[in-house]
Image: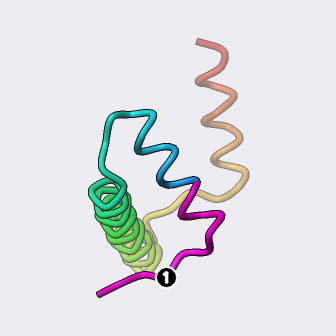
Amino acid sequence: MEVPLTPEKEAQLSKLASENGRDANALAQEVLVDYLEQQARFVEAVKAGEAALERGDYLTHEQVGIQLNMLLRS
């Protein structure tokens, strides 16, 4: 798969890779892999939050405020 970049973004990627002694293609692949992993973690966190809500395992806004106040006092 090829991902087209604007000339500006291609230049930015090449410059960043060069500054770090890297190949632009390898850097682009690394960035894409990192992004995909981050997105997968985000989706899992959202699912975990939704499951907690369904179980009734959550704090109200007021309860969060109380917890923060107690934490800041200690």
Task: For the N terminus, give its image quadrant.
Answer: bottom left
Query: Going by the picture, which residue comes out furthest to the bottom?
Result: 1
Of the residues shown, which amino acid type is indicated by label 1?
Answer: Pro
Q: Which of 30 and 65 is in front in this view?
A: 30
Residue 27 image point, x, y percent: 34, 53
Q: Would you identify the image quadrant in which residue 18 lies?
A: top left
The structure residue drawn at horizontal position 64% and vertical position 46%, both measured from the top left corner, is 64
Up-down: is 55 above or below 72?
Answer: below
Question: How far from the left and from the top, in percent, is residue 63?
Answer: 64, 48
Q: Nearer the viewer, residue 19 or 69?
A: 19
Place of residue 38 in the rendered image (x, y in percent of width and height, measured from the top left):
37, 61
| Residue 74 shown in magenta | no
Q: What residue does disc 1 label?
A: 4
Q: In this view, does 72 lie to the left or right of 21?
A: right
Of 6 and 67, the residue lying toward us: 6
Q: Which residue is drawn at 60% across and 36% down?
A: 67
Q: Quadrant of residue 39?
A: bottom left
- Residue 28 point in image, percent of width and height: 37, 61
Q: What stretch is highlighted in magenta?
A: 1-11
Mark 1 Cα shell of 10 Å, populated few (<14), some (14-19), many (≥20): few
Image vertical order of residue 72 relative to residue 16, above or below: above
